[in-house]
Every structure is written in C-alpha cells, then in structure tokens.
Image (cartoon, rainbow, N blue to C red):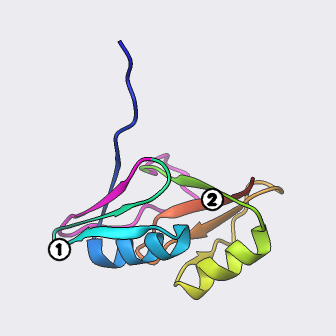
Amino acid sequence: MTTTLAMINLDGPDPRAQAAFYGALLGWQTVHAEDEYAMISGEGAPIGFGRVPGWSAPPWPDPEGTKRYHLDLAVDDLDAAIAQARDLGATLSEHQPGEKWRVLIDPVGHPFCLCPR
C-alpha cells in the first residue's frame, strides 16, 4: 500500500485572506475561494483553508504544547523571504529557537518557519 499526501488543510478565521497570504508568499494560484473555504495550488500538495467560527491563534512560543501545526518553507534567500513575508502581513517572532531559520507569524496568528534551502 502506498500513501501520499493529497492536501494540507489549515483552520482559521478568514480562508480568503489566508489563501491570499500563502498564495503570494509561495507564488501559487488561488484555485478556489469562498467565505467558508479557499484553496491554493502550486508545486507540491495543495493547501486548503477552512473557516472556523471563534477560531483563536495558537500561542508562540507555546509552553503548554497546544500548537496545532507549523509549515516549514524552504527559501533561496532567507533575508529576502523574511522581507516578502513581512510585506504580506507576517510578523517576525521575538522568540527564535534556532540560528539557521526564522519563525514568523502569519496574518491570522499561525507560526511558520522560513528555512534556507
């Protein structure tokens, strides 16, 4: 039996905004956008975004271990990728647990990492 990753789905308060942010950051196309659900597609498994009423962002850093997920995104130029993510609405986390990658927070509060390729 072979199992493959078909898709990643992320919860949040605004699927269209999440799709716009990650689509721009990854250079992917929005292939579906509604108030309740949006999807982007490009190289690799597509990413879907589902609306969850009353959603709250996980804390970062997370001393209680309740963080739900994070994406590691490989980049050719770390400084340029950080600048692009910040221009798109991400913030650089004050807490940086490593030297080689950077943790940012997306516009709805999910942490993600930019990692040198």
The answer to whether the residue labelled 1 contacts the one labelled 2, judged by CB atoms less than 8 Å apart, is: no
Residue 29 seen by the camera: yes
Q: Nearer the viewer, residue 30 or 101?
A: 30
Residue 14 seen by the camera: no
The vertical placement of 50 against 4, above or below, is below
SS class, disc 2: strand
Is 57 part of what is drawn in magenta?
A: yes
User: Residue 58, image x and y in percent?
Assistant: 43, 61
User: Which residue is situated farthest in the top direction here?
Assistant: 1
Q: Which residue is mark 2?
A: 113
User: Which residue is situated farthest in the bottom direction here?
Assistant: 87
Residue at point 17% right, 73% down? 34
User: Which residue is situated farthest in the right direction here?
Assistant: 99
Residue type, numbered disc 1: Glu
Q: Which residue is mark 1?
A: 34
| Residue 20, picture quadrant | bottom left
User: Residue 11, image x and y in percent?
Assistant: 30, 59
User: Crowding at label 1, few (<14), some or many (≥20) Cα neighbours within 10 Å?
Assistant: few
Residue at point 63% right, 59% down? 113
- The stretch in magenta equals 45-67
Q: Nearer the viewer, residue 111 or 62?
A: 111
Residue at point 64% right, 71% down? 93
Q: Is residue 18 left or right of residue 24?
A: left
User: Residue 80, image x and y in percent?
Assistant: 74, 77
The Cα–Cα distance between marks 1 and 2, rounded to whole angstroms, is: 27 Å
The vertical placement of 31 against 46, above or below, is below
Prevailing secondary structure of the magenta residues: loop
